[in-house]
Image: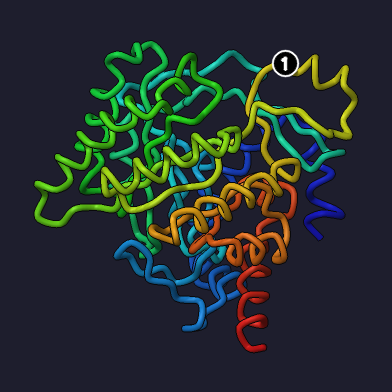
Amino acid sequence: MYKTLLRPILFWFSPEVVHHFVAKTLTFFFKIPFTSSVISKLFNVDDPRLIREVFGLKFSNPVGIAAGFDKQAEMFNELANLGFGFIEVGTITPKGQPGNPIPRLFRLPADNALINRMGFNNGGVHEAIKNLRKRKTKVVIGGNIGKNTLTPNINAINDYVFCFEQLFDFVDYFVVNVSCPNITDLRELQYQESLMQILGKIQQINGAKSHPKPVLLKVSPDLNNQQLDEVIEIVKTTRIAGVVATNTTIGRENLRTSASSVVEIANGGLSGKPITSRSTEVIRYLAEKSGKAFPIIGVGGIFTAADAIEKLEAGADLVQVYTGFIYEGPMIARKINKAIIKRLAK
């Protein structure tokens, strides 16, 4: 029904308009009495075989929503009713910022893909905290943190530390995002020296807490093997909890969308089916080269249960969806979880 009826209607409108419409609709819809319990029964797959214990946290199932969908922590309570085992909010920055000029989100239907150059648009850490105080769900919540666009890289560590300290009591785990291609010079922070400083400082603060929280690093699919080796070394040295693989790509190879349309869209991070294979390759490389020394959250081009299972078999402990959720609809978590149970039964 979603793909044949609702999606064609939604795709008549700009992606960002639809996103805001969906957010408001979800919020309104779940205010209706008994709606949450009814929808939860329809979408959730309650089976002990799906439970995962990863980096000290218990997940009801291994399928989550990736960062970028609920940037300001506005609808995580509602999304939790759609069968997801965890939800990652953000990217959250210290100060609110509008992001890049509109239009900044584009569909590539021929490729089952999106290109975005949102630019960390969000209301800032204090707005996110105000929303997170309204938490009703027991689903695991992650906080994806970044720096403000106007913060020079030399001072970026202060932005990450500020977000970490402010959000500490309101999320269950953290993801340090230095791999988004839509913030000027941000990807320069992926260099080993910069990452060691940022993650080292956060881990120092984290270790002083009575109950430290898991800290993960989100990596780019555009890293080469030498850079991935450096990621493995960074994880071991800083003793962070794991890695999220992968972010969006700046690549534009082998797209079905016309070259002229892609050129017209211009810069931005590509997500969806075109990065399915590369994301899995990165997951497999990190898992095998490290000897599965740390947990991996696999994300990138998951549209079907087979896509998710492929990433789990490549070495991911958990998976996340974003573009697949938009193209496949709200039943995606249920379909994946059902398939996982079926596979385990065999």
In the rendered view, does 267 fall on the left or right side of 197? right
In the rendered view, does 211 fall on the left or right side of 40? left
**Residue that extends furthest to the bottom in the rendered view of this protein:** 345
Question: Which quarter of the picture shows residue 109?
Answer: top right
Of residue 95 and residue 31, the one placed in the foreground of this image is: 95
**Colour scheme used in the picture?**
rainbow
- Residue 189 picture location, percent across and down: 40, 24
Does 295 sit above or below residue 342?
A: above
Is residue 79 visible in the rendered structure shown here?
no
- Residue 333 picture location, percent across and down: 61, 64
Total marks shown come to: 1
Question: Which quarter of the picture shows residue 157?
Answer: top left
Of residue 169 and residue 188, the one placed in the foreground of this image is: 188
In the rendered view, does 248 fall on the left or right side of 98? right
Question: Within 10 angstroms of label 1, few (less than 14), some, or many (20 or more) residues?
Answer: few
Q: Secondary structure at mark 1?
A: loop
Does 172 sit above or below residue 343?
A: above
If the image is split into quadrants, where does the C terminus sit?
A: bottom right
User: Circle 1 is placed at which residue position?
Assistant: 266
Of residue 277 and residue 334, the one placed in the foreground of this image is: 277
- Residue 100 picture location, percent across and down: 55, 16
Does 125 sit above or below residue 73?
A: above
Of residue 190 and residue 76, the one placed in the foreground of this image is: 190
In the rendered view, does 44 fall on the left or right side of 186? right
- Residue 318 picture location, percent across and down: 50, 61
Look at 23% across and 36% down and name the residue there.
200
Is residue 142 visible in the rendered structure shown here?
yes
If the image is split into quadrants, where does the N terminus sit?
A: bottom right
Look at 38% across and 62% down and name the residue there.
137
- The type of residue carrying mark 1 is Ala
Look at 71% across and 49% down and name the residue there.
277
